[in-house]
Amino acid sequence: MNMIKFAERFQTEKQCREALFNLRWPEGFVCPKCGHREFYLVTRRELYHCRRCEHQESVTAHTIFHGSHTPLTKWFIALMLAVDKRGVSAVRLAGEIDVSYPTAWLMLHKIREAMSNRDSGYMLSKIVEMDDAYFGAPDEGGKRGRGTDKTPAVIAVQVDKQGRPQYAKAAVVDNLQGETLLKAAHEMVEVESELRTDGYKPYQKLSDNQYNVQAEKFDPKGNPGHLLWLHKIISNLKAFIAGTYHGLDKKHLQRYLDEFTYRFNRRKYQSQLFMRLLNACAATSTITYKDLTADNLEAS
């Protein structure tokens, strides 16, 4: 959907509400309390009133938009910006849709909640490449690699038999010990999958727990194809976070990793990204400022 089509389709609150209505009730209204289909609209409050049990339902109930005072037209613009592979910072969003920075920050975290929720039930399988990476502000001492003080994360990508990437997942971890890596693997990768890793010893813990681990020392000169696509994805992920958000602390890092992998996993469906994200937002319950313990609003 290009910007011209977007502007034509979602320029009014009514159009946005109709889009949400069709996503929530594609075959017509169904009362979530009693299942009855007959209703009337309470226009002053935009509520659907069930004629049988008299339950009243908002089109935004049980979605990330619930309780928000921001117009849906602005929400929809935020979604359109959020599907861009570069993402959008809260600073930029605040300027684009004329809301305060805290409002934009919360909106984007709600959108990331929908992204995370959508991919949470999917597992990588068959052939999976796995490695670790580090995120955060530069160390004062300049330490790099596995000796850094930055936040570690495990990145995994499912590849086909030709080694081409299919789907990716990422998880923030406390450390890179064997038990921690095993827990991360169980959350992202189906057991009995083939796991391709570098020679880092803790990854061997996975071979004792129903994974077929193929560990090989990383040698970019002698074996340039080893973990090639995984390292490209990690590089793009770091560039995404550094370029759009200028580095992040551990507190909300997982949400940003989920944002990146959500878009990566749907890269072949560019024309459908907005509607897919809108559908995810309509199927995800809202979170609040308090839920995010917003005592540390990083400039993102």
Image (cartoon, rainbow, N blue to C red):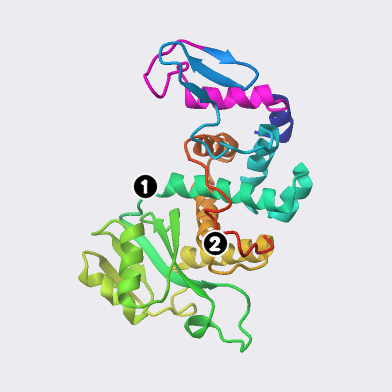
Residue at 43% x, 75% y is 223
Disc 1: which residue: 121
Q: Indicate whether 231 appears above or below 292.
A: below
Q: Which mark is residue 264?
A: none
Query: For the N terminus, which image quadrant?
Result: top right
Q: Quadrant of residue 213?
A: bottom left
Span colored in magenta = 10-39
Position of 176 with respect to 39 (left or right) is left
Q: Secondary structure at mark 2?
A: loop
Image x and y of residue 17, in percent: 61, 25
What percent of the width, then of the height, locates residue 256? 55, 58
Q: Identify which residue, 225 or 169, lies in the foreground.
A: 169
Residue positioned 61% across, 87% down in the render:
142
- Count residues near mark 2 (Cα–Cα under 10 Å), then give few for <14, some for 14-19, many for 20+: some
Q: Is residue 280 above or below residue 265?
A: above
Q: Quadrant of residue 186?
A: bottom left
Residue at label 2? 252
Above or below 74: residue 112: below
Task: Tell me the kind of residue under disc 2.
Answer: His
Residue at mark 2 to residue at mark 1: CA–CA distance = 20 Å
Which comes before the other along the chain, label 2 or label 1? 1
Residue appearing at x 73%, y 27% in the figure:
11
**How many neighbours does mark 1 have within 10 angstroms: few (below 14), some (14-19), or many (20 or more)?**
few
